[in-house]
Image (cartoon, rainbow, N blue to C red):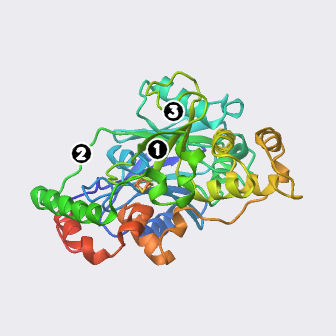
Amino acid sequence: MNMRNGKIGIIDLSTGVSSEEDFVGDVLTAGVLRALLAKHGPDSIVLGTGLLTGSLIPASCAGTLTAGQKTMPLLGHAGIELKLSGFDFLVLKGKAPNWGYVWTRDGIVELVELRESPQLNSWQRTDKIRADQGDSKIQVVSGGPWCDAGSPAAQLVVDHWGGEDKVGMGAEFGKRNLAAVAFRGMGELEIADPEAHFEGSVALMKGHLSRLGPNKGLQSYYEGAGREDFVSLVHRYIGCYGCPFPCRTYLKTEEDPKEMRFMHKEPGYLHYDVPALEMATQVGLSSRDATRVLTRCAQAGAEPVAVLTAAAVGGGRPDVASIESLLSRRADVKPVNKGNFESSLPSLKDYETCLGLGLCPRYWAKVGFDIRSLSSCAESAIGHTLQ
Ligand code: SF4
């Protein structure tokens, strides 16, 4: 099947038993998610890839993670890596008896115990999983202590960084004794007409770039990243899979930003969480301190807009130390309903369609999301008209 593996991986966390089902059809992701939740139980967690995830269409990097009514995007290299692991969708059922993580690669899905997980923050979990499995390119969607505790203001992080989970997905992991989900794949995807798809994708990208002009990383999407103290800390811009106009900007706070080697264990942070940066500015943090706070929040698995909002209660001016102290008082922080990628497109329907196709909503909002503009390119990949 073009652009699909034709397989759904299923694991019962309560027993560790895994199985697989055929996936027939290449309808958009939202419909499949509903069907999988109906079949495997509304308490299941479903990870999904989009129809065009991993194609040559610009910014076709997106996957999704759904629990109940909550869905968060999986960006960076997580969506493509999930698809190349051999599954189009992954269903996680039940609750694990002990802390552990789901490990998926090359058509295999298993539950690996990680009993020390409650002592590890999200960064330590990612590093440990990569070290234990012997591959630094493993993609890890990880919880932290706030997720373990089931805090409604928790966030999952994707490969160390926060910004995708604005729906409280972290608590869903905690409820199931799930420390993380990790995937890696070396699979291949079939394309209906590779030559036409390549040419169509290049033409799409050229058309976009000629309209967009020079890229300035996050500043190209969010004016606040043009602040002098933000720009002075910029180390480099990083794109997700297939993104020609990246929003991701890495800031170094603990060493010279122009130093290309990493000399310090935690030199900085990858920014793409616009609402968190807006809130940090609003409470009076410098870009350096905002970066430090977002790092601590990501490690704890705490959603930073909620943390910063709580830190500003009473009208005081929070600093890094007071926010670090707040991170040890989860009960004082309530969730805040503020989307990041969810706010990119004008309608929820467009957002869901964009994600269902496997496309980054932020990039496609910037270039103008119009399904007609990409339909012939998509059709050269999947071999039939887009439904
Ligand atoms: S716009 Fe940002 S989040 Fe979207 S694909 Fe590009 S780098 Fe990734």
Q: Residues within 10 Å of mark 3 (few under 14, many from 20)?
A: many
Q: Quadrant of the C terminus?
A: bottom left
Q: Is residue 52 left or right of residue 302?
A: left
Mark 2 in CB contact with mark 3 (< 8 angstroms):
no
Find the distance from the CA under tag 3 to the CA under tag 1.
45 Å
User: Is residue 387 in view from this perspective?
Assistant: no
Going by the numbered disc 2, the residue's amino acid type is: Glu
* Mark number, residue 188: 2
Quick one: label 2 or label 3, which is nearer the N terminus? 2
User: Is residue 241 in view from this perspective?
Assistant: yes
Quick one: label 3 or label 1, which is nearer the N terminus? 1
Whether the residue carrying mark 1 lies under 8 Å from ligand 1 is answered with no
Most extreme residue toward the right is 314
Q: Residues within 10 Å of mark 2 (few under 14, many from 20)?
A: some
Of labels 2 and 3, the one closer to you: 3
Q: Is residue 115 above or below residue 343?
A: above
* Mark number, residue 45: none
Of residues 26 and 308, the one nearer the viewer is 308
Find the distance from the CA under tag 1 to the CA under tag 2.
22 Å
* Mark number, residue 18: 1
Quick one: label 1 or label 2, which is nearer the N terminus? 1
